[in-house]
Amino acid sequence: MTSLSRRGLLGAAAGSAAAVAAGATSAHAKPGRGPGHGHGPGHRRGQADLVLHGGSVLLLDRRFTVAEAVAIRGGVVVATGASRELRRWIGRRTEVVNLHGRTALPGINDSHVHGIRTGLALPPYNIDVGLSSIADVAAAVGEAAAAAEPGAWIRGKGWNQDDFAEGRAPTRQDLDAVSPDNPVALLDWSNHQLWVNSRALEVAGITASTQPPAGGVIVKDGSGQPTGLLFETAMGLVNQHIPPFTEEEQTGALQNNISLLLSQGITSYTEPGVGAVQRQIYERLAAAGELRMRVTALLSRDDDTYPVNADQVREILAGRGGRGSGRFRVNGVKLRADGVPIASRTAWMREPYVGGGRGSLVTDGSTDTEKVAELLEMIALVEAAGLQVGTHATGDAAIDVVAEGYARAARGRGRGHGRGRKHRHYVIHGDFAWPETLRLLARSGAGINFNPNIKQLIADSQPGVVGPERAAYQSPYAAALRAGVRVASSSDSPNVVPDWRQGLETILLRQGLSGEVSGPGQRIGLRPALESYTTVGAWQDHAEGWKGSLERGKVGDVCVLDGRLVDRKGRLALPAGEISGLGVAMTVVGGEVAYTAEDAAQRREATAAAGVSWASKPDPGGMCRHC
């Protein structure tokens, strides 16, 4: 297919007059209220800064309109419609892009991305351990230890026990032979399991008699000795001894993350949990005009961990500061209810896992009743402060508690409480939210945020963890929509690659990595699937008035695909199984081209993660095996 042309030639635009489409909605834009609005320097009345024409421009408005062209001026969409009708917006300084039949849609809103962590998960900050065997991981650690200073920490990211050829859990002894003197800490793909060597346990003072903190697990062998695996809050016993990344390193990691996201067509994301240093990085870049996309943040503790009791929530609220402006805004606080429903079995479930155990809440308390009360109080504190709550909850029992907390907030219990509905609290992940709980969330005006890329990754192994019925139900898109819940989709990068096209494909097909279908009854259609990546993410951010669609007056954020996703009637234009193979040709933020696949330098920046297991794809039709 012919490459995109960025030459602003009036003659080339005039040549598109033969193209026809349904009536344009061109008119002068209404003033917007969100960041990025306003006319640029030297702007001329009636002349657009950027016009994209000659393709299928999916507006994601209420009518699911497919136009042929879009014009952007001063960072704002001023017209959409047929190519010939938008010629009047083209002047000498207008940049004109011929889409050559490709599909353009609103910039993707990935509503759950650990931005700085994504950058830090890439070399040189962490070694890649998303490998197919324990032996391969040990070899990679050995190479890093040989090159490291004596006593320096070896950090890695990405391992997945389900992928190991040895068919067993890793142990500290696997790492001791290759790194006896350097402490090693390897985070798994999910960020909920830490694999360390004996030297790291020694530094942390973890012995057979060490008791884990509330919500944590220190895995021990038959003789009662630590095996080197730490789950959930127990990871903090080691993490507190690892030197933190410098502010300079975190800033560089954030810019690497943004380059990666722009190459995916993502123009906006939610950063779920920033401490004081990370917030300062975002605010400094935003103030300097160097934050290249829009970021909404939830607050966490200053050490970048999530609160486990009400006192820690009070500390966060006491130091919360302002709400931000421009491209960086703070909306609320991130809480965490439980763990994850994978091999570690730390999500809190109503019924036991296959093999036993139900997991637990991670909040403080010696009993389930005390833990539940603590979590409800934490939600109430954030609600009373007038902020949004985003709570990590994956097990059905944990989601039940969170939904009850949101319902209480919506009912406005007691003096000083606002109406929870207006704050748009939401459940993060929500893997096993059953219909009755989803209906409670809907009545409370709360949302839910699913991760289809994770669904694809763990679908094949889930029956062995939670049983076939619960495995098929996991990420219940159809049930949530039937209940009336606002459903957003996100990647949860760096736990998986931030590829919304793979996510969209998984939503439509419900296939695991093997290709086997998991829960066909939870499939939904193309329109709500696309809305979950655009308009609903904007709603979650309290920003649907100015972003999320390509309607007039909204910000000119655009993702251009290197092919046709939809036809002129908004129908899928290719087999669903081929969606993940569509490349991103161009990304536009506020009317300015922020990424184009034709720019070799931008491609190099965006593909700095090439070869890193969680961020690379071995073929255009599928997600990486180890991400």
Image (tube, rainbow, N blue to C red):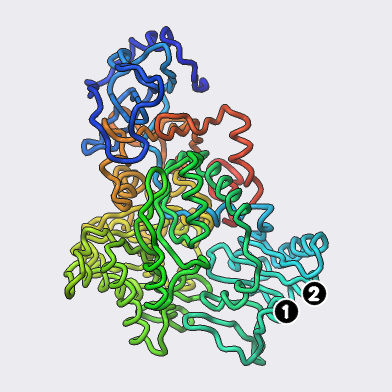
Residue plotted at (51% across, 80% down): 216
Residue plotted at (67% across, 64% down): 155
Q: CA distance from mark 1 to mark 2?
A: 8 Å
Q: Is residue 474 visible?
A: no
| Nearest the eye: 527 or 224 | 224
Compared across the picture, whether 240 is left or right of 23 comes to right
Q: Quadrant of the C terminus?
A: bottom right
Report crowding for label 2: few under 14, some 14 to 19, many 20 or more residues within 10 A (C-alpha): some
User: Which of the labelled discs sits on residue 25, or is there none?
Assistant: none
Amino acid type assigned to the residue bearing label 2 in the image: Pro
| Nearest the eye: 469 or 183 | 183
- On the image, the x and y values in percent for residue 177 come to 80, 73
Report crowding for label 1: few under 14, some 14 to 19, many 20 or more residues within 10 A (C-alpha): many
Query: What element does badge 1 sit on?
Result: helix
| Residue 599 vertical position relative to residue 281 in the rendered view, above or below | above
Residue at the disc numbered 2: 180
- On the image, the x and y values in percent for residue 457 come to 50, 58
Q: Which image quarter: residue 32?
A: top left
- On the image, the x and y values in percent for residue 354 come to 46, 78
Query: What element does badge 2 sit on?
Result: loop
Check whether the beta carbons of the residues at disc 1 and disc 2 lie within 8 A of each other: yes
| Residue 169 vertical position relative to residue 97 in the rendered view, above or below | below
- On the image, the x and y values in percent for residue 504 come to 41, 46
Residue plotted at (54% across, 81% down): 217
Amino acid type assigned to the residue bearing label 1 in the image: Ser
Compared across the picture, whether 413 is left or right of 565 comes to left
User: Which of the labelled discs sits on residue 198, or is there none?
Assistant: 1
Residue plotted at (43% across, 55% down): 112
Q: Is residue 587 visible?
A: yes
